[in-house]
């Protein structure tokens, strides 16, 4: 029977020193996929290799391979990357059938990611799958599996809120700005000082519609240099803060040892800007903006701790949502697993029906040819043979389906036995081809 | 007729519950999958209520034989109708949908008041049988309904501002319109309401002075407080234009303005004597 198996390592179980040893380059991927099929008798394979995880998904027929499919993947990785099987076992996880399905669904739903709810992983898995498919790795079963995994990933993101709420300081600032201003389209952001965080925040604000960037620095040359990155306007920093009159959003991150923006001068500025809202973000330590500024009407001040608190509360929300997401993933995995198994036994059931039907029809014809029966008698005999076929097959088929639904019973053995006993194997294989 | 109104009241009740629920359950709870469904039920419930109410007013109008504005029971029904109409216009902007959680329950309460008064057909006092009465009353009640919406935006503004300032992310924080949006919409509603109120008052004055030929008693309680209300809104708009009164101050004046409206509409009728009272 076909087994879906996987072996992998991720940031959860292994340090980067080990993960990098398992990583695959594109050329290696093509080579490995070929290898898996030819030398290791794996029917289908997809390899996912990102900075946080390396995973190999495979489908193998347990009847055709002597070893367990998990062992095959283990051997493959061990041989390919020249790592001992024991080390590999220590730093990796291995899954089988339902567990594999569930694991992949968790990965595409970003439940297994470092930041739950992140969006990148879905694209990464898609790329890996597309690559493996074009290299001839993925076949009928993995195609179904990955298609389902992508739809589960999307479902989780739309039905739960694991992907909502900013989880980085810079995005939290953008979200807050959206709660203050009606629109960001015609707004101006001013950056005081320099720093990665403030530049990143300004960049996010610009992508969200902010139209103008002012860059202030103690030295005008620095301001010019930073302003180039945003096509911004450089200004020389002045004590009177007049350059803030047009600024709707102010991001300050200087290394000044004292407050740059104090309540009194800013009150004057607010008057000059006719009390339009001002959102001040202080990401400097020690702080650049006097905390009392938040008492000015229409001025909203958030410092680094406030933003971090927003991020922390969002992360907490995501974690709570993740519990719900896990439930959905489990249900979907179980359903997919059952469907797949039904699909596995269906050809056998069909072949069995066909064989019985054929025998019945042949025998009926022979019988009718050598006797003379009235029309009604012919019909009666024909329907009797049909009934016999149906009743003979009823229990075997029902029990086979039960074995599929009941996770403990090994339906694979049943299928194998049926194929052997009724010599269905040949027909069945032809059909699959 | 009575049955139709009862159904309308019940539909409004259901719609208000779902509107309030939509606002209350917030964006990030374990009920988040329910939220779009609740929003849908709230919206279509409101639409259904609106259609039923419109039907009722038309039927009642044709049975009365004159514009149904004589009794409380009529004017409150019309008030609820106008509130719903304005909500249906405003809610086309997704960001502003939260206002339904405030104004639709308001509409429900007014329609419930309307329902609790006994309904009987009776002719208008003769001196009031004029076509000019219709725009006079309609415009003033439309203005009131718009002021009520402005009041709603004022309240939403104060809640949102508080949560941003205190850095507390309340449950429905994420559903509230941005400060800028609440402020802007409250202001626009105020201006529109003021224009309608002004025209409505002018028609009333003209009605009295030139059609009935009677001098208007400016000290009549209802007239007096209508002018006071008008004045409050004029001051609000002038201050905004002159000194940039926006945000919290604007929100407070929207709330004060509507309290004045309530007093003029309800308080005067209950506690003071006025020529505008026909109980």
Image (cartoon, coloured by chain):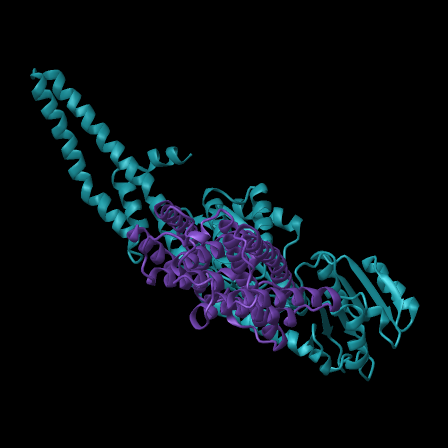
Chain colours: A cyan, B purple
Residue A327, picture quadrant: bottom left
**At which x and y percent is residue A179?**
63, 65
Relative to A385, A68 lies left or right: right
Residue A90 in view here: no
**At which x and y percent is residue A41?**
48, 47
Report how many numbered discs are placed on residues in the image: 0
Q: Please identify the quadrant where the C terminus of chain A is shown.
A: top left
Q: What residue appears at the point 77 percent right and 66 percent down from the top-left corner? A: A199
Relative to A72, A167 lies left or right: right
Q: Nearer the viewer, residue A180 or A17?
A: A180
Relative to A216, B157 lies left or right: left
Relative to B182, A426 lies left or right: left
**At which x and y percent is residue B27?**
50, 64
Q: Does A48 sit above or below residue A278?
A: above
Q: Does A216 sit above or below residue B201?
A: below
Q: Nearer the viewer, residue A114 or B172?
A: B172
**At which x and y percent is residue A302?**
68, 75
Q: Nearer the viewer, residue B53 or A153?
A: B53
Q: What residue appears at the point 46 percent right and 49 percent down from the top-left corner? A: A148
Residue A215 in view here: yes
């Amino acid at each position: 029977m076909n087994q879906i198996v996987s072996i992998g390592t991720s940031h959860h179980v292994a340090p980067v020193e080990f993960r990098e040893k398992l990583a695959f380059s594109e050329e290696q991927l093509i080579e490995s996929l070929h290898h898996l099929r030819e030398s290791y008798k794996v029917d289908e394979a997809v390899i996912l290799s990102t900075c946080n995880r390396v995973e190999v998904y495979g489908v193998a027929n347990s009847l055709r391979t002597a070893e367990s499919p998990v062992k095959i993947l283990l051997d493959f990785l061990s041989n390919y990357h020249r790592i001992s099987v024991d080390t590999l076992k220590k730093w990796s996880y291995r899954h089988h059938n339902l567990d594999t399905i569930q694991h992949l669904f968790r990965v595409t739903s970003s439940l297994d990611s470092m930041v739950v709810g992140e969006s990148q992983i879905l694209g990464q898995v898609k790329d890996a799958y597309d690559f493996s498919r074009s290299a001839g790795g993925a076949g009928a079963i993995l195609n179904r599996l990955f298609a389902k995994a992508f739809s589960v990933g999307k479902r989780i993101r739309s039905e739960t809120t694991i992907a909502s709420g900013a989880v980085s300081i810079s995005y939290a600032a953008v979200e807050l700005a959206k709660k203050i201003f009606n629109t960001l389209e015609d707004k101006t952001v001013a950056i005081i000082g320099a720093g990665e965080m403030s530049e990143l925040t300004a960049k996010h604000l610009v992508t969200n519609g902010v139209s103008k960037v002012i860059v202030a620095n103690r030295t005008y040359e620095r301001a010019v240099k930073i302003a180039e990155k945003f096509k911004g306007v450089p200004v020389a920093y002045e004590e009177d803060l007049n350059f803030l009159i047009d600024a709707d959003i102010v991001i300050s991150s200087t290394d000044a040892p004292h407050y740059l923006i104090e309540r009194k001068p800013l009150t004057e500025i607010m008057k000059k800007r006719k009390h339009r809202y001002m959102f001040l973000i202080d990401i400097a330590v020690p702080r650049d903006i006097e905390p009392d500024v938040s008492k000015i009407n229409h001025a909203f001040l958030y410092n680094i701790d406030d933003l971090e608190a927003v991020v922390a509360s969002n992360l907490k929300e995501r974690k709570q949502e993740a519990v719900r997401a896990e439930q959905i993933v489990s249900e979907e995995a179980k359903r997919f697993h059952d469907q797949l198994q039904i699909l596995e036994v269906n050809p056998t059931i069909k072949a069995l029906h066909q064989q019985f039907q054929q025998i019945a029809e042949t025998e009926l014809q022979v019988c009718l040819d050598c006797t003379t029966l009235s029309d009604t008698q012919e019909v009666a005999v024909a329907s009797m043979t049909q009934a016999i076929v149906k009743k003979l097959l009823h229990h075997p088929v029902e029990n086979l389906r039960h074995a599929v639904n009941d996770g403990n019973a090994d339906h694979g053995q049943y299928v194998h036995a049926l194929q052997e006993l009724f010599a269905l194997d040949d027909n069945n294989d032809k059909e699959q081809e | 007729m009575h049955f139709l109104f009862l159904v309308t009241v019940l539909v409004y009740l259901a719609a208000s519950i779902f509107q309030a629920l939509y606002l209350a359950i917030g964006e990030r709870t374990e009920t988040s999958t329910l939220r779009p469904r609740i929003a849908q039920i709230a919206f279509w419930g409101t639409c259904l209520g609106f259609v039923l109410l419109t039907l009722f007013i038309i039927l009642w109008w044709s049975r009365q034989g004159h514009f149904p504005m004589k009794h409380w029971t009529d004017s409150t029904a019309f008030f609820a109708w106008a509130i719903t109409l304005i909500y249906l216009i405003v809610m086309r902007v997704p960001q502003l949908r939260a206002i339904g959680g405030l104004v639709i329950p308001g509409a429900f309460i007014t329609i419930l008041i309307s329902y609790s008064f006994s309904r009987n057909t009776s002719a208008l006092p003769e001196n009031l049988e004029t076509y000019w009465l219709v725009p006079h009353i309609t415009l003033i009640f439309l203005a009131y309904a718009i002021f009520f919406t402005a009041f709603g935006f004022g309240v939403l503004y104060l809640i949102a501002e508080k949560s941003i300032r205190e850095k507390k992310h309340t449950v429905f924080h994420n559903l509230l319109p941005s400060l800028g949006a609440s402020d802007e919409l409250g202001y626009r509603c105020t201006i529109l309401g003021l224009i309608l109120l002004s025209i409505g008052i002018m028609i009333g004055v003209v009605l009295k002075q030139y059609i009935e030929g009677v001098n208007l008693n400016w000290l009549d309680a209802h007239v007096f407080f209508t002018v006071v209300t008008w004045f409050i809104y004029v001051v609000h708009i002038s201050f905004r234009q002159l000194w940039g009164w926006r945000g919290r101050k604007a929100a407070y004046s929207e709330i004060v303005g509507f309290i004045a409206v309530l007093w003029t509409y309800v308080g005067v009728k209950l506690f003071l004597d006025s020529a505008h009272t026909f109980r």
